[in-house]
Image (cartoon, coloured by chain):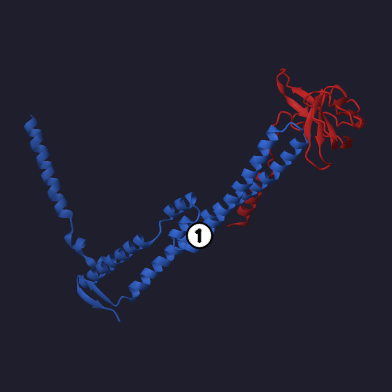
Chain colours: A blue, B red
Amino acid sequence: MSRKITLLLLLLLAYAALAAQGEFDIRAFSDSTKYGWQDWRDRVAYRDDILERQQLLQMYEMEASPIRTTIIKSLLIPGLGQMDSNAGTKGSILLGSELLALGTAYLFWDRSQYYYHKYQQATQVEEIESYYNAAQNPRQYSLLFLGLGAVIWGYNVFDVIQTTDDYNVEVWQEIMDKYARKKVTLGPQGIGVRF
Amino acid sequence: MKPRSIALLLIITLLLASCGLKRTNPLDPIGNTEIQTPQTVSNLIIYGVSPAGADNKYVDLRWDANSSLTTDGYFVYRGLGYSASYAVVDTVFTNSCYHGSEPWHQVLPGIYWYKVSAFKDIYNDEGLYLGRLEGRLSEARPVVVPN
């Protein structure tokens, strides 16, 4: 019984394979005109074009700044993403401003803490008041500079997106310019000269 | 950067800047409204000075007594000039000081300026001692201790 079933299945498979072969149209498959190519030369030219584009894309990927990386860098160290995107001056200014703002904030905070500690130890009414006032002003300046640092940091993150984008456009433009200037090309078809 | 974002960041900055310091000193009368600040000592007078040639030099100081609600005692300060720094030379619990009566009192011939301040021992609700809060210093009074 099982032999009969096996045989029947084999016959069915053989028939399906034959039927499929019959339906496959090799001419339609190899018809290059459906892609707009008139003959094999067009096809080769198209392939060369794709290869060249791939090459340009590879060059672009090597030279371009990945936007995610530059954002992370700028999030960690303000200005670093800009430096990576060939905007060293802007990056240095942002980093310098951030350090200056945070440094000033720390100095004011330190001075405030000095007087605040004295305030906490004071037992005389006048001293309590004067030390509290002496601690409060630098604390406010410290917070202001900290806020300024936050503004610079926020701007830096916003700016790195724009800067990286501009840089990548420039990189692509340069690659395209170089490609356009390249007059002699070496391909599978031999040496090509562009006039 | 959009103007709205800049405005938001500025508002955050101003909010941060407006945050005041906490008044954590337990003796701070502004931070702890239950504390009564000792009154400033008034009508400080030099009641008497040792005469010239006396072996034991002294200065007798008197002032108006403060309410016992705000004052437990007084600190007596002495300086060598009106604007000089003053140091506590005695602690008394009445409204007078006979400076020169104790062996540690050093009263030598010269010109001195005296100030007095009141103090109050502060306890919290549970009766825990927080410290001694001192009020404002009185006006300075000069005295010449003769040789």
- Count neighbours of disc 1 (C-alpha within 10 A) and say few if under 14, some if 14 to 19, many if 20 or more: some
Q: In the displayed structure, does residue B35 sit left or right of residue A1?
A: right
Number of numbered labels in the structure image: 1
Q: In the displayed structure, does residue B93 sit left or right of residue A159?
A: right
Q: Return the residue nearer the eye: A149 or A112.
A: A112
The answer to which quarter of the image holds residue B97 is top right
Looking at the image, residue A140 lies above or below residue A26: above
Looking at the image, residue B126 lies above or below residue A69: above
Q: What amino acid type is highlighted by mark number 1?
A: Ser
Residue carrying label 1: A92
Return the chain for callout 1. Answer: A
Residue B9 position in % (x across, y down): 62, 50
Residue A179 position in % (x across, y down): 33, 72
Name the residue at the bottom extreme: A195
The answer to which quarter of the image holds residue B109 is top right
Q: Return the residue nearer the eye: A87 or A185.
A: A87
Q: Return the residue nearer the eye: A171 or A180.
A: A171
The answer to which quarter of the image holds residue B69 is top right
In the picture, the quarter occupied by the C terminus of chain B is top right
Q: Residue at x 64, y 47 (%)?
A: A108
Q: Of helix, strand and loop, which one carries label 1?
A: helix
Residue B102 position in % (x across, y down): 81, 23
